[in-house]
Amino acid sequence: MAKEITGTTWTVYDANTMTQAEIYGSVLCELGEKHPDIVGLTADLGKSTKIGLFGDKFPDRFFNVGIAEQNMFGIAAGLAKSGLLPFVSTMAAFTAMRGLEQVRTDICYQNLNVKMIATHGGVSFGAAGTTHHCTEDIAIMRALANMTVIVPADGIETAAAVRACIDYKGPVYIRIGRGFEPTFYKDENYGFKIGKAVTIQDGTDITLICCGVTVLQAAEAAKILKESDGLSVRVINMHTLKPLDEEVILKALTETRRIITFEDHNIHGGLGSAVADVIAQSGKGCAFEKVGIPDCYCVVGYPEDLYCHYKLDCDSIVEKVREVMGRDFEEDESWEDEV
């Protein structure tokens, strides 16, 4: 079972060293020393995405192609074909949409070993508005054959994902935030494995399945609900959206009969849709709801305010759990007649 940080003290001066991007940049530099085949690419966003740290350390293995994302992914495909291991980093909106044709045809179609670190995912670049929000990328990337999709909970898990993808063949899309995402895990020693979800807290009344920034919020909500309502809440960190850990979903379905998903992504095509597919295919009924960004272009504001506005913060999760727990549905012991 994973352990989370409690009682952490930090100041504004610590923020830059605790972000997902900052940690991944440092880890990539560390890996670069061990793996001379690693190369880095950016489209004039080395500083913003932190892959510039790799460029500072390995200038001969770093390529800034300028504001030309489509070309960048084509170049990455060529480098992979030559036996190198490209790490490409730009904003999620530019990876999943501006460079989509090249990601699909140049990289995924050939099943090339290109690792994409997509920053500023979801509404984490809140004040930048619709052009820089990215609430469609999980749906897009899940639909690409051969693509692996990972949405880490924090910087520690981002480091674990970057390390794991070194030996994981084929294209990988790792989606992280922009700025200060609070640290959840204490260290990397909690058993991260691509394609296997992490049960943060066990429970028998209801299951919360989350990814990214919602993991911490759900874990805190589970503590509140246990203390205030006496509820036993299972919390699952579904850090890998593809391949999906169907086994852990079916186990939760059988044992809790109530499931809610939370994600910083459009409610169509993301984590909630993936979990719903598994439930539907099982032929078993349950009380189910998915919470995320509604089918709209998001309002502009600070990320924390947007998470609250779209009901992804701790208090909103507490209220949603209470709502679903109060819902009536047929809860028999045998599903034979439902299959």
Image (cartoon, rainbow, N blue to C red):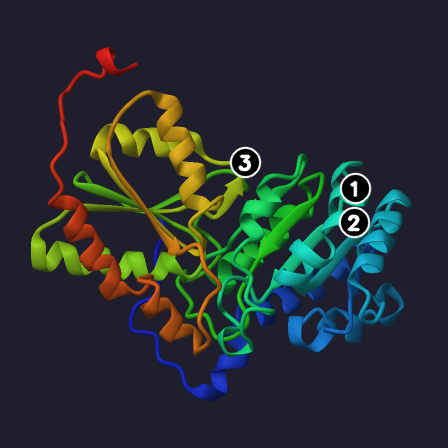
- Image quadrant assignment for residue 285: top left
Q: Which residue is mark 2?
A: 102
260 with respect to 331 (left or right): right
- Type of amino acid at the residue the image marks with label 3: Pro
* Front residue of this view, candidates 292 and 130: 130
Q: Position of residue 280 (x, y in %)?
A: 37, 27
Q: Quadrant of residue 36?
A: bottom right
Horizontal placement of 65 versus 182: left or right? right
Q: Quote the CA–CA distance across marks 2 and 1.
A: 5 Å
Dot 2 amino acid type? Gln
Using the image, tell me which numbered label, if any, was put on residue 105. Answer: 1
x and y percentages locating residue 255 in the rendered image:
22, 31
Residue shown at 14% from the left, 32% from the top:
329
State the CA–CA distance, disc 3 to disc 1: 20 Å
Residue 313 vs residue 235, the one in the foreground: 313
Q: CA distance from mark 2 to mark 3?
A: 22 Å
Q: Secondary structure at mark 1?
A: helix
Question: Nearer the N terminus, badge 3 or badge 1?
Answer: 1
Q: Name the residue rendered at 60%, 46% in the picture.
A: 140
Which quadrant of the structure image shows residue 238? top left
Label 3: element kind: loop
| Residue 243 marker | 3
The answer to whether mark 2 and mark 1 are in CB contact below 8 A is: yes
Labels 2 and 3 touching (C-beta < 8 A): no
Decide which of 35, 311 is in the foreground and name it: 311
- Residue 22 seen from this side: yes
